[in-house]
Image: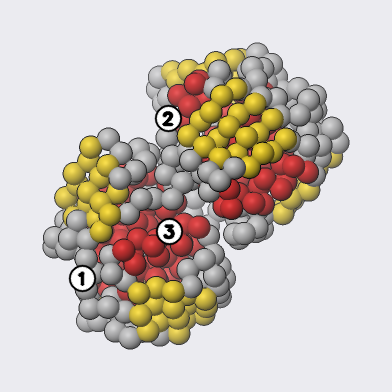
């Protein structure tokens, strides 16, 4: 039977909790190991299901992994295989991040098309258009992207839409391309900047990461390096909301406050007490949140990956709120499960209208994706009585020891199998 979480709600959380390294930074950094024959070392690799999946994929391509707790060394002395099989890609869309590095170093790649997922179709057309600009020959064969190039050449690439993994894939490919590559309309997310820092530590020459214009001067080879992965801003935001929704007093440490600007601003609009330090945020939850409206947008806007968590808080607000999702379709699947807990939420297209209730009531609920699972755990922490969250394997994809961290803050939460 799949694991589930049982939560006795209604307990204000108190104490200090540390944030782990970011899943969405760890995955492209691991893929970057394909760009060099030397070891790439991570002192703080998070222990997550998606990270384990990426490691398995790299091993099928020829990587050797030496891991001791959080410290991990990844070496691809020689690429033994250029295929990312559907069996792995279908379980984690970020597997497509091996496409650019494989073509750049090995000259060929065969990567399964990711297809759809629970929160909607996320095409990789921008990845393919960019690689074609860099001189790769691209074909679709039997559900696989096949890319070939003797050596990529620098080019000017303007992305039709902001895409984080697309920016990362093309940035990695361009590090070994001949000449200079410019990526316009690049994603500005902190995870993109973190990957650029990793690539530069390996000998890459990348300027402008964190802005919409990234310039990469190609180099003949990259070397090994040691890179510390940036803190997970989504885990940090989730833990901050946990303190707020339980009317608690929680300090979330080992984070980068600048990465949470839009989230903290919305929480302050809701009446949540926020105190910000250099590497920590202290949150004190109100008796009842105030309503607010939010629209998701690329960084530095309000992150789509925090939408479900904020909606859960707004479900208890004193008034009506509105959430508009502009990044992914089908990302309100958690709303129906929150209704099972007593929330009053109506969705129409990309907008959800939330009429706040005073209390959630414990119930059995089922997670549909990673962030939805976090939202249901938050609701369970605030609910009266017992909540059981099924399918928490979704949670394990992106949150490291979440129930342990919450239990250390006083939550009554247990994992059952």
Relative to 130, does residue 168 appear above or below in the rendering?
Answer: above
Q: Which one is closest to the eye, mark 3 or mark 2?
A: 3
> What is the C-alpha distance between the residues marked 3 and 1?
24 Å
Q: Which one is closest to the eye, mark 2 or mark 1?
A: 2
Q: Which label's residue is closer to the chain start, 3 or 1? A: 1
Q: Secondary structure at mark 3?
A: helix
- At x 29% / y 84%, what residue is drawn? 178
Residue 73 visible here: yes
Q: Which x, y percent locates residue 338? A: 67, 31
Question: Pointer 1: what residue?
Answer: 106
- Closer-to-camera residue (184/62): 184
The reply to whether the C-beta atoms of the residues labelled 3 and 2 are less than 8 Å apart is no
Question: Pointer 2: what residue?
Answer: 401
- Closer-to-camera residue (6/200): 200
Relative to 387, does residue 253 appear above or below in the rendering?
Answer: below
Residue 364 visible here: no
Question: Pointer 3: what residue?
Answer: 194
Q: Secondary structure at mark 1?
A: helix
Q: Secondary structure at mark 2?
A: loop
Q: Which x, y percent locates residue 350? A: 71, 53
- At x 69% / y 38%, what residue is drawn? 274
């Amino acid at each position: 039977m799949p694991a589930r979480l049982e939560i006795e709600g209604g307990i204000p959380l108190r104490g200090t909790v540390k944030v782990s390294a970011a899943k969405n930074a760890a995955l492209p950094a691991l893929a970057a190991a394909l760009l060099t024959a030397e070891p790439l070392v991570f002192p703080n690799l998070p222990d997550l299901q998606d990270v384990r999946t990426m490691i398995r994929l790299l091993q099928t391509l020829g990587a050797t992994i030496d891991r001791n707790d959080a410290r991990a060394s990844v070496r691809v002395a020689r690429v033994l295989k250029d295929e990312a099989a559907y069996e792995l890609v279908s379980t984690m869309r970020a597997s497509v991040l091996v496409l650019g590095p494989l073509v750049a170093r090995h000259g060929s790649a065969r990567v399964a098309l990711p297809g759809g997922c629970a929160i909607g179709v996320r095409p990789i057309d921008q990845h393919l258009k960019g690689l074609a600009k860099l001189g790769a020959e691209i074909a679709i064969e039997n559900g696989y992207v096949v890319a070939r190039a003797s050596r990529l050449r620098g080019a000017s690439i303007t992305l039709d839409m902001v895409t984080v993994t697309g920016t990362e894939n093309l940035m990695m490919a361009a590090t070994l391309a001949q000449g200079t590559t410019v990526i316009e309309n690049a994603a500005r997310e902190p995870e993109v900047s973190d990957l650029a820092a990793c690539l530069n530590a390996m000998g890459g020459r990348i300027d402008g990461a964190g802005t919409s214009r990234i310039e990469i001067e190609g180099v003949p080879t990259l070397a090994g390096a040691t890179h510390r992965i940036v803190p997970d801003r989504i885990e940090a935001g989730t833990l901050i909301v946990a303190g707020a929704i339980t009317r608690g007093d929680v300090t979330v440490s080992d984070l980068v406050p600048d990465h949470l600007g839009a989230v903290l601003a919305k929480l302050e609009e809701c009446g949540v007490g926020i105190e910000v330090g250099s590497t920590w945020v202290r949150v004190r939850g109100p008796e009842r949140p105030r309503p607010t409206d939010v629209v998701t947008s690329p960084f530095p806007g309000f992150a789509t990956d925090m939408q479900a968590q904020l909606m859960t808080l707004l479900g208890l607000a004193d008034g009506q709120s509105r959430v508009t999702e502009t990044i992914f379709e089908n990302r309100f699947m958690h709303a129906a499960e929150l209704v099972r807990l007593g929330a009053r939420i109506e969705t129409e297209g990309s907008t959800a209208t939330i009429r706040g209730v005073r209390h959630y009531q414990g119930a059995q609920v089922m997670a549909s994706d990673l962030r939805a699972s976090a939202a249901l755990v938050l609701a369970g922490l605030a609910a009266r009585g017992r909540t059981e969250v099924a399918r928490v394997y979704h949670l394990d994809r992106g949150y490291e020891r979440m129930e342990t961290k919450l239990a250390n803050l006083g939550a009554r939460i247990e994992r059952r199998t």
